[in-house]
Image (cartoon, rainbow, N blue to C red):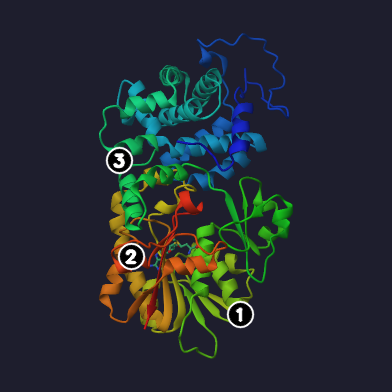
Amino acid sequence: MTSEQGGRSGHQNSARQNSGGGQRGGGVRRRDDAGRERNRSTGRNRTETAPGQRTRVADPARLVAFEVLRAVSADDAYANLVLPTRIRKHGLDRRDAGFATELTYGALRAQGTYDAILAKCVDRPLSELDPAILDALRIGAHQLMAMRVPTHAALDQTVGLARAVIGAGPSGLVNAVLRKVAAKELPQWLAELTDGLGDDVKIASIVHAHPEWIVRAMRQALVAHGRDVSEIEALLEADNAAPVVNLVALPGLGSLDEAFDAGFTPGELVIDSALSSGGDVGRLDSVRDGSVRVQDAGSQLVARALAAVMVSTEKTDGEERWLDMCAGPGGKAALLAALAAEQDAWMLANEPAPHRAKLVSQALAAVPADSWTVRTGDGRDIGREHPEAFDRILVDAPCTGLGALRRRPESRWRRKLSDVAELGPLQRELLESALAAVKPGGVVAYVTCSPHVAETIAVVEDAMRKRTDLELLDAGAALDAVSLSGSIGAGNTTSAVPAHRMMAQLWPHIHQSDAMFMALIRKN
Ligand SMILES: C[S@@+](CC[C@H](N)C(=O)[O-])C[C@H]1O[C@@H](n2cnc3c(N)ncnc32)[C@H](O)[C@@H]1O
């Protein structure tokens, strides 16, 4: 299990520097540039016996983490959306914001492992604890197990947080439980929790903090794409690392010069992209004007692959017509529309949720307006309403998002196996609609941000079985064709099933991208 690796140096520094942070005796706590507290005026001896007695006011960075965990567990909030607002609300400086980010994301990602440890230290089922106490314990556990926070500071500050925001009684429980947690280091806890377990899936689930059904699904996906099942450890660990920030310059519209001047480095997977493990992208003018966008490298690759693949359609009025059937919030739509504009094509971006359709319009604002139109509606209707009307169609289907666990720290614990079955009919209907809407000679890209075989290979195979006019193109080769290295190994060269050799899967541990799946289907 790792903590925020993407911002590693910044966060680990902040973890060290903030290790003793917090307000004392009700005073406002400030740190100097080296992270040392100023105004240490109490002169009080720090003992390890009664941390809760010392700290009565919550350290703002830990308070932010606690508030985000509460919003996630009580209100089903998304941590990546709530965290920035709480950081602003509490006025955290850059260092404290880094600490709060590592604490929040780390505690959420590893929740299953920490709950297993906590269950050994609490004398009742965790489900019987006040959920606020459980969240405080998770925050304490992450500091003790995975951050370089000295034990006394982790205890002192977490008990102080509990005292300030939950109450004196609960803070005693938090103190007692965290002392038991602190008695062993993480490797000892993991050894104890997995001792005698003969099942590799259960062991990986505890050690790498993923639900068992997801470990099983990832193993199955690796094998289905011709990879060795032993890669599972690296894949799960990649999910536990913070992703680097990827930028794309919209072709013909944006330049990365400003990003490079600001310390971004050229992306290695895909052209016109840049990488950063930290920094505030919102400060870049080019990001603010929408000509440079934050976008995962895998998303960039699939959009570029669809735009570059050969089609042999009859063109309406000499121009190609493209469709992004599931466009919200508009990441791929912006890149696709810019590519369409370069090729004198026009694109329809469809999204049924009105607020997400609005985001699509905003994402497309930097692209010449005569190159695109946004439709607010159900993609399942498009095949019937516009039969054989489009040369290229992207179906970026609603899915479990198991390929993007790096950026959504809570989602692995929120998602359920039943979600996969629930999404299946919609995924199939959207693909069928796209296959009706594509012209003969045109191509449909079926894409998911999930490697789950039931959402990927199975959906494509079902669609192929239903029609006789379809052909799978080599999606791995199509990704290679638009990659910088020319060979990224996303295809499957070894499968005994010819159709499986045509489908491509990107992986966080190999490509440092989301686990994006792509099949390219040509209608003959
Ligand atoms: C995986 S997201 C698409 C991400 C988007 N392509 C991007 O790159 O930003 C799937 C989208 O499909 C939309 N969706 C859900 N049901 C749909 C339907 N019946 N027809 C079309 N889109 C649908 C969701 O609202 C969601 O915005």
Of helix, strand and loop, which one carries label 1?
helix
Residue that carries the numbered disc 3 in the rendered image: 201
Query: Where is residue 520, by image quadrant?
Result: bottom left
Closer to the chain start, of discs 2 and 1, is 1
What residue is drawn where x is 58% and y is 23%?
A: 57
Residue that carries the numbered disc 2 in the rendered image: 500
- Above or below, 50 against 268 in this view is above
Residue that carries the numbered disc 1 in the rendered image: 370
> Alpha carbon of mark 2 to alpha carbon of mark 1: how far?
39 Å
Residue in front for this viewpoint, 69 or 451:
451
The spot of residue 86 in percent (x, y) is 57, 40
What residue is drawn where x is 35% and y is 35%?
A: 206
> Alpha carbon of mark 3 to alpha carbon of mark 1: how far?
52 Å
Q: Is 343 on the left or on the right of 477, as rendered?
A: right
Amino acid at the residue labelled 3: Val
Amino acid at the residue labelled 1: Asp
